[in-house]
Amino acid sequence: LAVGLLVGVVLEVLQRAPRTAHVVEPVASGIAAAAATLACRFAPVSSVVVTLAGIITLLPGLSITTSITELSTSHLASGTARLAGALVKLVGLGFGIALGTRAASALGAAPPPPPSEPWHAVAIAAAVAVAALAFAVRLHERRRDAPLIVLSCAIAFVGARVGASWLGPELGAFVGALGLVASSNALSSIVRRPPSVLIVPGLLLLVPGSVGLRSVLSLLDSAVVPAVDTAFKMLLVAVALAGGVLVGNLAVPPRSAL
């Protein structure tokens, strides 16, 4: 929470000036990584997890998924441009994290991260609800749409978890996207709201932005094989999400196509 608020302040300051607007991602990620690395000296936390959580809104996971969808529907120019922009943004974020981590590590070696612990189902449900409300604020949605956004995010999350138990963690995103798009198209005809109001927040829970960033970080650490493996997983998740969106629109056409 503290690192996320710090990143938010940095964004508000840098985005106001045209000269600094182009270096928002590297500077914000570098500050987040440095703060997380310093924080792990005083608390038993993982600097990687804290850094990813602090910059999660900057990750271009939705852009990667959208570009794959556009390429799948023969929109080659827009899809290629969007994918290239997302990859450049990932590289900038990775460079900032590497620089911030190395700068903070110069003060001394950081302690090893603590072992991960399983989360209770109630905590996970609360996290999904809070994330949905945060996405609603981030996307400037109307207040009366907040309950529907929470519902769509819950459908996407549960669908992805169920799909992961059937098909694996990567292809499980296909089931989550399929259930999200089909239910959002059905609900949009009832509440008379555009389907995108419900689809976009739900997709933000499933997009592979953090996976792509881990690939870039592995590449910066000269771990080529893990970087390629993680990048392939990112593309697999993006393709699964794009396939889920396309099949969901075929199963339950949006209101404008009815």
Image: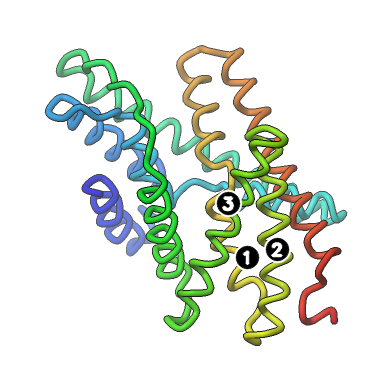
Which residue bears the numbered disc 1?
Answer: 199
Quarter of the view holding residue 126: bottom left
Quarter of the view holding residue 180: bottom right
Which residue bears the numbered disc 3?
Answer: 158
> Residue at 61% of width from left, 47% of height from top?
85
> For the residue labelled by badge 3, is the local secondary structure a helix, a strand or a loop?
helix
Q: Are marks 1 and 2 in contact (CB under 8 Å)?
A: yes
> Residue at 64% of width from left, 47% of height from top?
64
Label 3, label 1: how many angstroms apart (C-alpha)? 15 Å
Near mark 3 (Cα within 10 A), the count class, few <14, some 14-19 or many ≥20, is: some
Residue 244 - label:
none
> Residue at 44% of width from left, 49% of height from top?
58
Three-letter amino acid code at the position of disc 3: Val
Q: Left or right: where does residue 1 sit relative to residue 226?
A: left
Question: x%, y% of residue 110?
Answer: 22, 17
Q: Left or right: where does residue 112 sit relative to residue 136?
A: left
Label 3, label 2: how many angstroms apart (C-alpha)? 13 Å
Which residue bears the numbered disc 2?
Answer: 181
Q: Nearer the viewer, residue 135 or 84?
A: 135
Question: x%, y% of residue 230?
Answer: 60, 25
* In the depicted structure, whether residue 36 falls above or below residue 152: above
Q: Left or right: where does residue 19 sit relative to residue 111?
A: right
Question: x%, y% of residue 100?
Answer: 29, 30
Q: Which of marks 2 and 1 precedes in the sequence?
A: 2
Quarter of the view holding residue 104: top left
Three-letter amino acid code at the position of disc 1: Ile
